[in-house]
Image (cartoon, grey):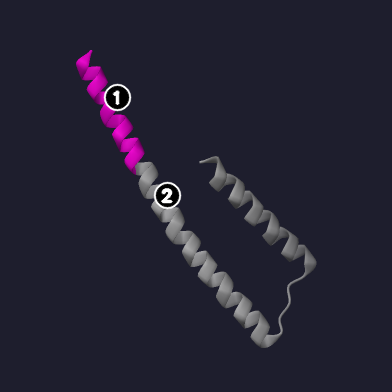
């Protein structure tokens, strides 16, 4: 029984480490995306480029979905 408990504990620890690494990666990627969004906004302002309303709605929907996924954790 102790052997099974040790295996379960080891598996749980491995899972928790994976989750922590995943959260770190998500945090890093979100910083990259924010930086890119800032750069894109700057370029749009610089060159007067404007996105269509459909693209804006799609982007807003993606952000909402991401926030929902993030809050579920």
- The residue at which mark 1 appears reads as 8
5 is within the stretch colored magenta: yes
Give how far across and how far down residue 10 sits, in percent. Answer: 26, 30
> Can you name the residue that lies furthest to the bottom here?
47
Residue extending farthest front: 71
Secondary structure of the residue carrying numbered label 1 = helix
Residues under numbered marks 2 and 1 in contact, where contact means CB atoms less than 8 Å apart: no
Residues rendered magenta in the picture? 1-17
- Quadrant of the frame with the N terminus: top left
Q: Position of residue 31 (x, y in %)?
A: 48, 64
Q: Is residue 54 magenta?
A: no
41 shown above or below 71: below
**Which residue lies at the image location 36% right of the left edge and 49% below the top edge?**
21
Magenta stretch, main secondary structure class = helix
Name the residue beneath numbered marker 2: 23
Q: Residue at x 71, y 81 (%)?
A: 49
């Amino acid at each position: 029984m102790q052997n099974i408990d040790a295996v379960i504990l080891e598996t749980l620890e491995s899972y928790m480490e994976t989750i922590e690494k995943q959260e770190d990666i998500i945090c890093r990627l979100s910083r990259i995306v924010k930086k890119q969004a800032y750069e894109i906004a700057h370029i749009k302002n610089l060159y007067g480029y404007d996105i269509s309303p459909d693209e804006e709605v799609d982007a807003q929907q993606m952000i909402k979905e991401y926030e929902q996924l993030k809050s579920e954790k």
